[in-house]
Amino acid sequence: MPLITLNGAEVYYEEYGEGDEIIISSANGFHPTYPASLAQAPTNYKVYTLQTLGFGRSARLDAAPPQGYLNRWAEDVIALADHLGVEKFTYTGISHGGGIGWVIAHRFPERLKALLSVVGTPHLRQGVTDSSEGRRKIVDNPGNPDVIREAMLEIAGPTPEGREELREAVLRSGVASKLDQDPREARINQGMPFPEAKDNDALRAVLSTIDLPVLILGGMRDGVIPPGSSVLAGSAVRRSKTVLFEDEGHWIAKESPERLVREIKLFMDELDGRALPARDETLSLVGGEVGTV
């Protein structure tokens, strides 16, 4: 797949599937099962994944963009859509990739059909907006496997029972990836969406200006995007739907991607009017009892 020039720099993207529903995602790196899996059954979407500027096969950055990483990365997503001739699309992103989606929803709402946010709602405000604590530990300790492992465990959250081996495999892979990073990648700290919002009330005020279909998928055990973050966003954004998995954490996209796909298919089918029950199957309450109309 090609390197293309967007906003004056070369970035790398891949495409999957042949469906009519267009999904664009962006991240520092992609796990092979999500979002590329959205191009397969049962969703069968057309999926484009864009690697963020500064990482992987995309061009390196010697300094942070003047407007901040998340804003620049959001602008690159819009530039990719323009390059593809796509006027309106659905965006999905995980963690920092979800943060990119929230910036797009705020700055370019007319370009989105919907936002699918996976463990990526804007961080709760706890005195700082430059970085989460876990991310800061990783940036400040490049090459230190013990600190990186500890930080990644904090980010992931408590391990669900019966998933210990999978969690350990994901953790080993993640630590190895961090240790193998280009130093210019390792020092990038993307910050938080909407850093101008210094407390949760200000964050709610920003989020309340977003008015488009949003699916928020989160884990109750998430160590960096706790359930309160998803609830705040879900209660502030009109036309949003929030799904929280009790037994999932920040790595749901790596550990349980099939659960995300099921929820996304339901949400998108409902959005397109394909998941509504037939008239005679619609449940209603009649005289205090459940009946059909």
Image: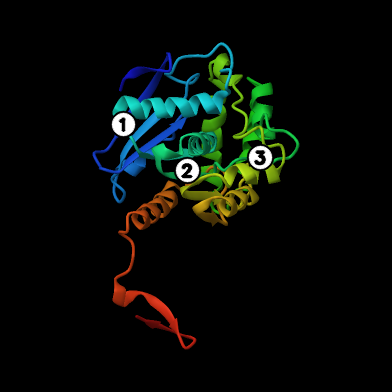
Pick whichever of labels 3 and 2 is earlier in the sequence: 3
**How far from the left and from the top, in percent, is residue 127?**
75, 36
Residue 154 is tagged as 3
The residue that appears at 65% across and 42% down in the rendered structure is 203
**How far from the left and from the top, in percent, is residue 165?**
53, 44
Callout 1 secondary element:
strand
Q: Is residue 283 above or below residue 219?
A: below
Which amino acid type is marked by label 1? Answer: Glu
Give the CA distance from mark 1 to mark 2. Answer: 19 Å
Q: In the drawing, does residue 50 fall left or right of residue 218?
A: left
Q: Quadrant of the C terminus?
A: bottom left
As drawn, the residue found furthest toward the bottom would be 287
- Check disc 1: other Cα within 10 Å, few if <14, some if 14-19, many if 20+: some
**How far from the left and from the top, in percent, is residue 72?**
51, 24
Give the CA distance from mark 3 to mark 2. Answer: 17 Å
Which amino acid type is marked by label 2? Answer: Ala
Residue behind mark 1: 15
Residue behind mark 2: 253
The residue that appears at 66% across and 39% down in the rendered structure is 154
Asked if one can make out residue 28 in the rendered structure from this viewpoint, the answer is: no
The residue that appears at 36% across and 81% down in the rendered structure is 292
Q: Quadrant of the N terminus?
A: top left
